[in-house]
Every structure is written in structure tokens, then in C-alpha cells.
Image: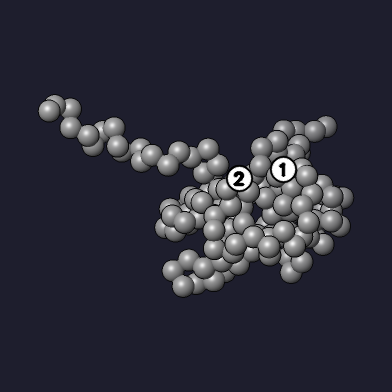
């Protein structure tokens, strides 16, 4: 018997729940994100490409060369809806910010505190379809002239 929680997530978001692979029930996506070699961890457990597409870099289902990240500018946000996997700097702190955001207890709060993450980690911070216009603009404009 299969429940909806046993099926891979169809949009590009990592699962945050515990699920089973080969009889082992764990928070697999968190384990993958914390692995020393994420690519190897995902390759050993192919199901993770479906269940943890952000961490395993499988959102677009077209494998990209692993050195693609090193050839792109390291400080510019990624223009398509894919989280960065490299280390980059925010306020002088250089980290794997998207991984940190994905592992935060409160992802929304983590992203809100570091607004740059909405551009650099759009999948994790749920900003893939965000529009650049501020949401308060309509309510803050004067109604009379």
C-alpha cells in the first residue's frame, strides 16, 4: 500500500518528512544535504533525485556538468528557479547559504532575515514565481489627488 507521502514530490521542493528507502525510514533529504559528498550520496540512492530534487540538483531533470557552478559568477543570483549549491557571501559571511536555509527549523524566517536568499535560493525560500513589485505598493499609494 502506498500513501501520498510515499510518492516523490512533483514540484521542485525537497521532502522534509521521514520516508523509507530500502527499508530505512529517515529524513533522507536532510541526511543528503548534510553529507560530505552530496552528489555521491544521491547517486547511491537514486530515489533521492525524485524526493530531494533541490539537494540532489535534479529539479530540471537534465543532468548538468558538476563544474558548471564554478564557471558561473559566484556572487550573482541564479536566474532560473534553482537553488545555488556553492558557497557565497552574505554580509561578509561565506557559507553554503541555501543548504543552511533548507536545514533551518523555520525556513520562512531564515529566508526573511536574509532577503538575498529569495534570489539565491528560490526553491528553498519559495520565491520561484515571486514578482519584484512590493506587495504593499497598492495599499500605500494615495487614493485622492
Which is more N-terminal, label 1 or label 2? 1
Can you give x and y, in whole percent of width and height, for residue 78 in the image? 58, 52
Can you give x and y, in whole percent of width and height, for residue 84 in the image? 62, 57
| Residue picked out by circle 2 | 80
Residue beneath the point at 18% across and 32% down: 142
Residue beneath the point at 66% across and 37% down: 11
In the displayed structure, does residue 48 sit left or right of residue 116?
A: right
Residue beneath the point at 77% across and 66% down: 37
In the displayed structure, does residue 128 sit left or right of residue 52?
A: left
Please determine whether, in this image, residue 73 is positioned above or below residue 52.
below
Determine contact: label 2, label 1, CB under 8 Å: yes
| Residue picked out by circle 1 | 60
Q: How many marks?
A: 2
Please determine whether, in this image, residue 53 is positioned above or below residue 1.
below
Q: Single out the residue that lies furthest toward the left.
A: 145
Q: Residues within 10 Å of mark 2 (few under 14, many from 20)?
A: few
- Quadrant into which the C terminus falls: top left
Residue beneath the point at 59% across and 64% down: 74
- Quadrant into which the N terminus falls: top right
Can you give x and y, in whole percent of width and height, for residue 59 in the image? 70, 44
Please determine whether, in this image, residue 107 is positioned above or below residue 90.
above
Quadrant of residue 94 within the rendered picture: bottom right
Please determine whether, in this image, residue 105 is positioned above or below residue 96.
above
Is label 2 in a helix, a strand or a loop?
A: loop
Depth check, front residue: 36 or 76: 76
Q: Single out the residue that lies furthest toward the top.
A: 144
Amino acid at each position: 500500500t502506498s500513501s501520498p507521502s510515499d510518492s516523490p514530490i512533483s514540484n521542485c521542493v525537497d521532502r522534509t518528512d521521514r520516508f523509507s528507502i530500502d527499508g530505512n525510514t529517515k529524513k533522507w533529504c536532510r541526511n543528503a544535504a548534510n553529507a560530505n559528498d552530496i552528489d555521491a550520496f544521491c547517486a547511491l540512492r537514486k530515489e533521492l533525485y525524485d524526493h530531494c530534487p533541490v539537494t540532489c540538483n535534479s529539479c530540471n531533470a537534465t543532468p548538468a556538468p558538476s563544474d558548471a557552478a564554478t564557471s558561473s559568477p559566484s556572487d550573482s543570483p541564479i536566474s532560473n528557479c534553482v537553488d545555488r549549491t556553492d558557497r557565497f557571501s552574505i554580509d561578509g559571511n561565506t557559507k553554503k547559504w541555501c543548504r543552511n536555509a533548507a536545514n533551518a527549523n523555520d525556513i520562512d524566517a531564515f529566508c526573511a532575515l536574509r532577503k538575498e536568499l529569495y534570489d539565491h535560493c528560490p526553491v528553498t525560500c519559495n520565491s520561484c514565481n515571486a514578482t519584484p513589485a512590493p506587495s504593499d505598493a497598492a495599499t500605500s499609494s494615495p487614493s485622492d489627488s
